[in-house]
Image (tube, rainbow, N blue to C red):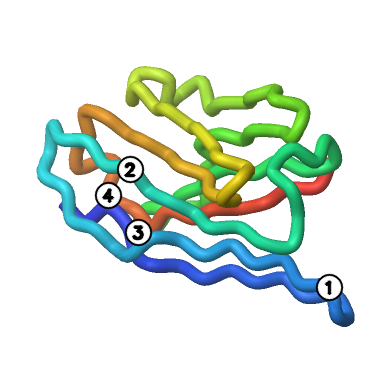
Amino acid sequence: LGIMEIMFISFSTGVYSIDLIQSDSAVVQPGKSVTITCQVSGYSLTDRNYATGWIRQSEGKTLEWIVLRWGSGVYNQNNALKNKLLHHTYNNSIKQVYLQMNGLTTEDSAVYYCAREPQ
């Protein structure tokens, strides 16, 4: 079960740069768990103007959002994925965001992206 590929997403405006760098790719067996890490720079995870979260794309399908966490602490999660026992956490002091997924199935095989969304 191929779960994810390494992704590097970088936004740049003039000399200001926002970077989101994900952990390496992983292969996870059905029924197991995985935690993906995203290292961010260029903004604070507690900035109320932005949300940091996760989206995924399965082969041949469109992007599907998983979960967003706004800097205010408000979470928005895709209701269709609530049975996946998702756990989305962050550590602002080291600027890392984590997505833990439990009870994975072959339907979860996708490329997972860490993303930032403006308010």
Specify the amino acid type for callout 3: Glu
Three-letter amino acid code of the residue under disc 1: Tyr
- Discs 4, 2 touching: Cβ within 8 Å: no
Distance from Cα at disc 4 to Cα at disc 2: 14 Å
Kindly indicate the quadrant of the structure image that contains residue 84: top left
Residue at image mark 2: 35
Mark closer to the observer (3, 4): 4
> Where residue 40 sits in the image (x, y, percent)?
61, 58
Measured in 3D between alpha carbons, the distance from the residue under mark 1 to the one under mark 4, in whole angstroms, is 34 Å
Q: Secondary structure at mark 4?
A: loop
Q: Which residue is mark 4?
A: 109
Mark whose residue sits in front, 4 or 2: 2
Q: Quadrant of the C terminus?
A: top right
Question: As displayed, is residue 110 above or below residue 76?
Answer: below
Q: Is tag 1's residue or tag 4's residue first in the polypeptide sequence?
A: 1
User: What's the distance in space between the residues labelled 2 and 3, CA to CA?
Assistant: 21 Å
- Which residue is the site of mark 1? 16
Identify the secondary structure beneath mark 1.
Answer: strand
How many numbered circles does the render carry? 4
Choose between 118 and 98: the one closer to the eye.
98
Residue 74's place in the image compared with 34, above or below, is: above
| Residue 30 image offset from top left, x and y in percent | 12, 38
